[in-house]
Amino acid sequence: MRQVQLHEIIACQSQKSDVVGDVFQRLHPSLVSLSYRYLGNSEDAQDVVMVSWMKVLERLSTFQYQHPLSFYAWIKKICVNECLGILRMRNNFNLQSLQDLSEEEEPWSEDFSHIDAITLLRWVSDLPEGYRTVFNLFAVEGFSHAEIAQMLEISESTSKSQYRKARLRLVKVLDAQNNRSKSYEK
């Protein structure tokens, strides 16, 4: 459950350790999953969540409660920024500019609904870092290519290219999975 009520925020600001622990335990799994999608490594994801949580506790007095999901949105933004900071330090986005690719985006018509979430998460985490980062920011988090370009200090066309290549790689994995399933059915 990602909702945090106002009385819980007030208790956290008062440093009531039982409430702080409860809120952390409730949000921890989704924050680790979020961080893992970016970093592709469980240990790094755990570290990011802990660093993010420490930053949240340090800055809790500045948090402005708006609704039950606003606290989760705030810590999620902190986690994403921590992940992007790690990726920048690694300087390993492996981003390539648009090469011989049409500027047009093909419609995302592939049906992933029959694939379980854990399998999809594994497929996304197996993408190269640059593809995975842009895919997460665009397809999962909903940022525009212009926003991604600014965040990652790349061109907008590079963001589009990385997203397209990530999609194509995921479609290839899906096709391979479907072909394996069909061969088992025979």
Image (cartoon, rainbow, N blue to C red):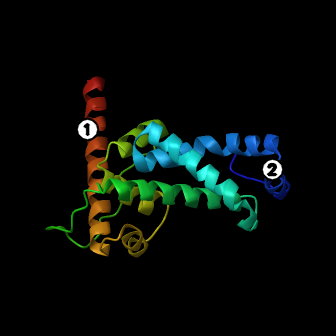
Image check: 55 left or right of 127?
Answer: right
Question: Is residue 146 visible to the viewer in this orientation of the structure?
Answer: yes
Q: Residue furthest left?
A: 100
Asked whether the beta carbons under mark 2 and mark 1 sit within 8 Å of each other, the answer is no
Image check: 39 left or right of 3?
Answer: left
Q: Is residue 175 above or below residue 11?
A: above
Under circle 1, the secondary element is: helix
Q: Is residue 30 above or below residue 98?
A: above
Image check: 18 left or right of 73?
Answer: right
Q: Is residue 109 above or below residue 186?
A: below
The image quarter in which residue 10 lies: bottom right
Under circle 2, the secondary element is: loop
Residue occupying image coordinates x 72% and y 67%: 62
Q: Position of residue 168 (x, y in %)?
A: 26, 54
Question: Is residue 116 visible to the viewer in this orientation of the structure?
Answer: no
Q: Tell me the quarter of the image containing the C terminus.
A: top left
Looking at the rendered structure, the kind of residue marked 1 is Ala
Q: Residues within 10 Å of mark 2 (few under 14, many from 20)?
A: few
Q: Position of residue 83 (x, y in %)?
A: 46, 54
Q: Earlier in the sequence, mark 2 or mark 1?
A: 2
Question: Which of these two is toward me, 135 or 46?
Answer: 46
Label disc, if present, on residue 101 of the rendered structure: none
Q: Nearer the viewer, mark 2 or mark 1?
A: 2
The total number of labels drawn is 2
Q: Which residue is mark 1?
A: 176
Q: Residue furthest front?
A: 58
Q: Position of residue 20 (x, y in %)?
A: 76, 45
Residue occupying image coordinates x 37% and y 46%: 124
Q: Which residue is mark 2?
A: 15
Q: Position of residue 72 (x, y in %)?
A: 66, 56
Looking at the rendered structure, the kind of residue marked 2 is Gln
